[in-house]
Amino acid sequence: MSTRRLFDIDGRTERYRSVLRENWFTYLLIMPVLLFLIVLMWLPFLQGIYMSFNEWPFGGDPTWIGAANYEFLLNWEPFYTSLKATAIFSLTTVFQLGVALAAALAVRELRRGKSFVSAAFLLSYTMPPLVIGTIWAYLLEPDFGPVFGYLTELNVLGETIYWGSSGPMSLAVVMFVTTWTFWPFMFLIISASLESIPEELYESARMYGAGPVQTFLRVTLPQLKSAILVALSIRIIWNMTKISQVLQLTNGGPGYDTSILAVLLYQFAYERGQMGISYAIGIVLLVMTLGFVFVFIREFERASEGAGA
Amino acid sequence: MSTTGYDATGVTLKATAYGVVAFLVLANLVPFLFILSVSFMPPSEFFTDPHLVPYEPTLEAWTSGFEELRGNLVNSFLIGAGTALLALVITIPGAYAFARKEFYGKTAGFYAIISAMMFPYILLVIPIMDLWTALGVYNTIFGMILAYQVFVTPFSIWILRDFFENLPTDIEEAAQVYGCTQFTAFVRVILPLAAPGIVAVGFLAFLTGWNDFLFANLLTTGTGPVPAVPVLYGTIGGGSGERVYWGKLMAETLIIGTPPTIIYLVARNYLESAFSV
């Protein structure tokens, strides 16, 4: 596998041909996956970009309208509400990391019962998110759900809170439920990585007289770096595109206060049948997601260089 | 003196750890206890003061919930099983090639597939709705199975490649010495050894098909093969304030939520080994 002939133009086609001849069976093996991803991902994605420049009713005939869908969004007040909601909502990823890190570090200290504890943790993650959303819709129902029922009975609250009619409170509820549902995913990845840190590192840290805080900052965190990086990047993207719980809990309301971009996309496609605008929202969502991931990875690199460990 | 100081922090740490674990376990289990209790309550009991043990437990919510969902549960099962099977057929050869063959473009191809995991899938739903209508698989079980491959194939390749990679090198050649062809060596030696990974991928794919809401809701209509999850969405419609028989709804959430939980508990060891990064 030398690369020295890579820039030799004459030899190139011949090289490709011989590569194909030698490895045709291997290429045949990976063909199904590549084919499926092209047909299921890249073709729809490209078609979607084209759709966003059209007036495209579901099942109807498209009309080319240039950038009008994007212009519509930029001049549409709720779009900005939605952008703001999306930005705030994305903080759920940070909360998930916090809970997952605390849980993983705490579980490591356990002598026994680890298996039971992690099974209990993962309960919320294995069930369909919409099921969890429905469960919380009941638990947090203001009139007869148990949460506010107990809070008023125990006089913690004077009267129940109709959170559904307040934008900030609805957003808080949606973020709480999302965090509650998805933190176990990060817990899985972080605790697997925690288990694999070699014990010698801790022994030598102890020998040099490092305290628990120092050990955590100098040994544990740097070792967890790639696990946290992977978990956070995946969850940033996945959290921003999960809509079932938001739909079930608030349906994007009140007004557009909890309509994160993904929900807006859904509403335009499903309720209004305007696929073009819907995909234009999707493009904005994609850019925003990639932006978040990019900024996060850059900051992460910088922070870990600064730590010097 | 420093030793006592160290012990004190040690004890505090342990206590904090146990406290965190206890809190999180309760936070995860108590909500389900309430749901379980409500699912046994007759409708009249929800509106009284909150209580955990039903005064007059009844199975009505469970039987009527199950009755209502039966057809949808069958759809969900078919979709989940089909997704798992198709995913394995597509990804086992690919993962094997990425793990044990050398070829031009290997690294680039692998990352092209894995990076699909980072793609916000919601962007694909809309064109796929359109495409599936054109292809005539909109509103069919096969169409859903096909669509879920976009979620499932990247992580299947990722997990399976690791399993194939960790098998002893030259094991195929050893099998060939004993008279296997390349193909029978793969079927009779490699596949059985990679079984834990295959099981893990199969279960994860099944869970994807069973748990998803987005594709399930957008690629079916009321007249088609609707799986169980979207049925729940119709019920409270984002708190529209209609009268809801919460007991039945909660029984339904548990009916839909139980199969994935059982699968997870059965397949835990496989899944956890698959998740280490």
Image (spheres, helix red, strand yellow):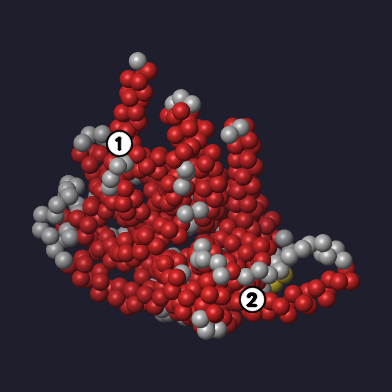
Query: Chain ID for label 1?
Result: B
Image quadrant assignment for residue A51: bottom right
Q: Residue furthest right?
A: A10
Kindly identify the residue that appears in the image at 30 percent across and 32 percent down: B15
Classify mark 2: helix, strand or loop.
helix
Question: Circle 1 sits in a helix, a strand or a loop, which is it?
Answer: helix
* Quarter of the N terminus of chain A within the rendering: bottom right
Q: Is residue A44 above or below residue A166?
A: below
Residue, far left: B56
Q: Which mark is residue A26?
A: 2
> Which amino acid does the dot numbered 1 rest on?
Gly
**Dot 2: few (<14), some (14–19), or many (≥20) neighbours within 10 Å?**
some
The residue depicted at 29 percent of the width and 76 percent of the height is B70
The residue that appears at 32% across and 20% down in the rendered structure is B4
Q: Quarter-wise, where is residue A281 in the image?
A: bottom right
Residue underneath mark 1: B19
Q: Vertical placement of A219 versus B62: above or below?
A: above
Task: Name the quarter where the C terminus of chain A is drawn.
Answer: top right
A297, B223: nearer the viewer: A297
The residue marked by circle 2 belongs to what chain?
A
Spot occupied by residue A279 in the image (x, y as percentages of width and height): 62, 63
Tell me if B56 is positioned left or right of B239 in this view: left
